[in-house]
Image: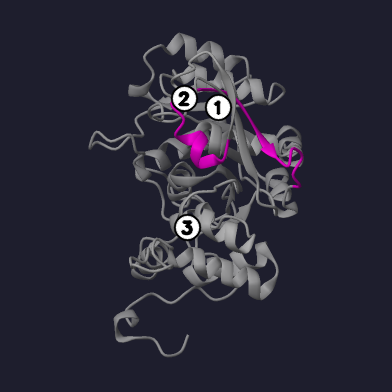
Amino acid sequence: MTGRSPRLGRLRRMPPEGRASRPVEARGARPRRRGTQPKVVALGGGMGLSASLTALRRITGDLTGVVTVADDGGSSGRLRDELGVLPPGDLRKALAALCGDDDWGQTWSRVIQHRFQSQGEINGHAVGNLLIVALWEQLGDHVQALDLVGKLLGAHGRVLPMSAVPLELQALVKGHDPRRPEDVDTVRGQATVALTPGEVQSVHLVPHDPPAVPEAVEAVLDADWVVLGPGSWFSSVIPHLLVPELLDALMETKARRVLSLNLAPQPGETEGFSPQRHLEVLGRHAPKLALDVVLADEAAVPDRDSLTDAAQRFGAAVELATVARTDGTPRHDPELLAAAYDRIFRMHGRIGPWR
């Protein structure tokens, strides 16, 4: 890299091509022998997927994030409307989450998350969104461009879109219009679905049978563990189950599957949902999906028996752990979540080396 400014001079250089960055071990975890790390794929979008990736990069260097591409708000929505591209925002957030904790990683994480503030057209756009879209236009390949951004950042893993076509999320919502509380309306757009005051009954994608990115399908089929959630349930988690090839891969893979529940209901989208109701609506959208483990924060589960019953319908065991931050906000603590994942991988995984 030439022409570095003095302020970037102290940053750690990226690892040589082909050499994986060394993952940071979870607090209290035993170091893994080289070559025995599990292959992990995390599916989701937004801040929920970022939380999982931030935790998982601490315990494995073989990590892939598969990101929903139905966002239509903010900078992503504007770029999508103007240029006809995939919404880059959730992909950017996932890449930022994979940045390391050293100077290089944290600097680049801040850079790609930086939003311009102005009185002009660039106002609100994130640097990473513009960078990703520029590389898509230059290379004409979604996956190659994201891999290149990941290489620049020194990312501890790979980020892939779940589909190569922009998707529209649509939902059947009861009481979307408060003046007609019993009516069921079709609500269009991820941003609108996420904030509806009504009760979301089901969601679907347009187009209805979108093609999956082949590399995403391959990653799921080749994984040791697949992690679904946490995140916006109807707009970030369930959409992965609405891509036929991706759902088939989730059902066919020999990987073990973890569902990571949210710390609290999301205002609007899942207002009033219990932990077990999250499982019930997931089952309605993918009735044949099997799970191995359901992870939940211990303090967020008032009725353990009901959650256990709901998990058993998927064939899953329930693991309760303290994974929330101690500041009272419904956000995951990266180290605590990493420790929970690490414990699950060891307790429910294969005996002996992974590969």
Numbered range of the magenta stretch:
188-211
* Crowding at mark 1 (Cα within 10 Å: few <14, some 14-19, many 20+): many
Q: Which residue is mark 3?
A: 75
How far apart are labels 1 and 3 at the CA level?
36 Å
Query: If you read the primary sequence from the N terminus, does the residue marked by circle 1 or circle 2 appear first?
Result: 1
Give the residue drawn at x 40%, y 39%: 337
Q: Position of residue 36 (x, y in %)?
A: 58, 50
Q: Are marks 1 and 2 in contact (CB under 8 Å)?
A: yes
Q: Which residue is mark 1?
A: 293
Q: Nearer the viewer, mark 1 or mark 3?
A: 3
Q: Position of residue 218 (x, y in %)?
A: 73, 50
Give the residue drawn at x 58%, y 62%: 82
**Amino acid type of the residue that numbered disc 3 sits on in the rendered structure:** Ser
**Amino acid type of the residue that numbered disc 1 sits on in the rendered structure:** Val
Q: Is residue 331 above or below residue 63?
A: above
Label 1, secondary structure: give it.
strand
Q: Position of residue 145 (x, y in %)?
A: 62, 68
How far apart are labels 3 and 2 at the CA level?
37 Å
Give the residue drawn at x 33%, y 65%: 117
How far apart are labels 1 and 2 at the CA level?
7 Å
Query: If you read the primary sequence from the N terminus, does the residue marked by circle 3 or circle 2 appear first?
Result: 3
Label 3, secondary structure: give it.
helix
Q: Which residue is mark 2?
A: 319
* Crowding at mark 3 (Cα within 10 Å: few <14, some 14-19, many 20+): many
